């Protein structure tokens, strides 16, 4: 579940240190198998009863074809929806109700109809806040993984590793923000976010190899999504016989 973080680290090193990590003969950053423990306070999570939950989608947006259509990742319930343009510098620009046309035949589908004077330049994402009917719980996990930096020789490896450490430390918060993920399938949703990223130890197991051990605290929000009319709890779905037996 740290693939996004691993990819972000490799990309960052190639962008910030192209002479060391990009091109023929450059140093290479790779990762060992990821292991993790569940936080003991969340190792036995209990799902909530189904009810209204907040949902947020980040949807790709083409300013040259704003109408879309666009589609939410989850079935929305009958609650207010707020749609924003996300600018190139990350600012959220609220769209007026008249600029968003929801499809009456499909509550998750909508089109953007920019108002007069609305600038779309540099906006490549829509930020949508809405409500869903879901049952949810959380898990906290502590991941441990090792990054290896391998170079052509001892000298170049030492330089690449030291400067890579500088890049990672100075951009730690940015890496954590970019390592989040959200996946939906079959009515289930998982949202992951990195809460902490720590560098704990290192080693030189070979002449042209350096390692860096990392600890990552990951927060998972787990949801089972329902249509608005569904009010069955996850417990009754998983234990129908027990629910029937408890009925008068």
Image (cartoon, rainbow, N blue to C red):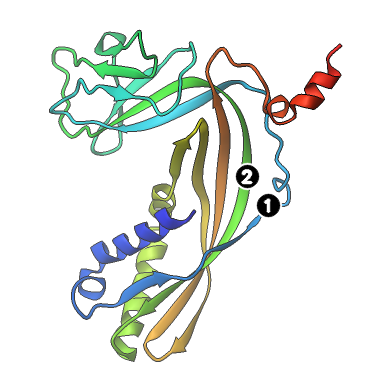
Question: Which percent across, then down, holds residue 21?
Answer: 26, 72
* Marks 2 and 1 in Cβ contact (< 8 Å): yes
Tell me, yes or no, if residue 93 can be seen here.
no
| Residue at x 35%, y 28% (from the top left corner) | 127
Secondary structure found at label 1: loop
Choose top left, top right, bottom left or bottom right for residue 136.
top right
- Name the mark on residue 112: none
Secondary structure found at label 2: strand
Task: Judge the density around disc 1: few (<14), some (14-19), many (≥20) Cα neighbours within 10 Å.
Answer: some
Question: Which percent across, then down, holds residue 182?
Answer: 45, 40
Q: What residue did someone put label 1 on? A: 39
Lower position in the chain sequence, tag 2 or tag 1: 1
- Drawn side of residue 112 relative to residue 104, left or right: left
| Residue at x 47%, y 56% (from the top left corner) | 2
Question: Which percent across, then down, holds residue 6?
Answer: 40, 60
Q: What residue did someone put label 2 on? A: 139
Task: Judge the density around disc 2: few (<14), some (14-19), many (≥20) Cα neighbours within 10 Å.
Answer: some
- Drawn side of residue 35 relative to residue 65, left or right: right
Q: Report how far apart the C-alphas of labels 2 and 1 lie in the structure.
A: 7 Å
| Residue at x 62%, y 40% (from the top left corner) | 138
| Residue at x 73%, y 52% (from the top left corner) | 40
């Amino acid at each position: 579940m740290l693939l996004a973080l691993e990819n972000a680290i490799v990309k960052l090193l190639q962008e910030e240190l192209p002479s060391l990590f990009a091109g023929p003969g450059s140093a290479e950053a790779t990762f060992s198998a990821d292991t993790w423990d569940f936080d003991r306070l969340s190792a036995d999570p209990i799902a909530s009863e189904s009810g209204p939950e907040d949902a947020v989608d980040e949807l790709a947006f083409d300013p040259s074809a704003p109408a879309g259509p666009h589609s939410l990742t989850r079935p929305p319930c009958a609650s207010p929806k707020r749609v924003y343009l996300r600018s190139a510098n990350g600012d959220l620009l609220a769209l007026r109700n008249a600029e968003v046309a929801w499809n009456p035949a499909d509550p998750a589908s909508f089109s953007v109809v920019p108002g007069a004077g609305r600038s779309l330049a540099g906006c490549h994402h829509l930020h949508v806040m809405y409500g869903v009917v879901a049952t949810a719980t959380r898990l906290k996990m502590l991941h441990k993984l090792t990054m290896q930096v391998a170079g052509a020789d001892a000298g170049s490896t030492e330089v690449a590793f030291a400067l890579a450490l500088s890049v990672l430390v100075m951009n730690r918060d940015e890496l954590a923000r970019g390592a989040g993920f959200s996946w939906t399938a079959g009515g289930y949703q998982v949202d992951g976010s990195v809460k902490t990223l720590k560098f704990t130890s290192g080693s030189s197991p070979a002449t042209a190899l350096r390692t860096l051990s990392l600890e990552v605290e990951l927060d998972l929000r787990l949801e089972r999504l329902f249509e608005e009319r569904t009010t069955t709890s996850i417990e009754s779905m998983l234990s129908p016989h027990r629910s029937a037996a408890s009925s008068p």
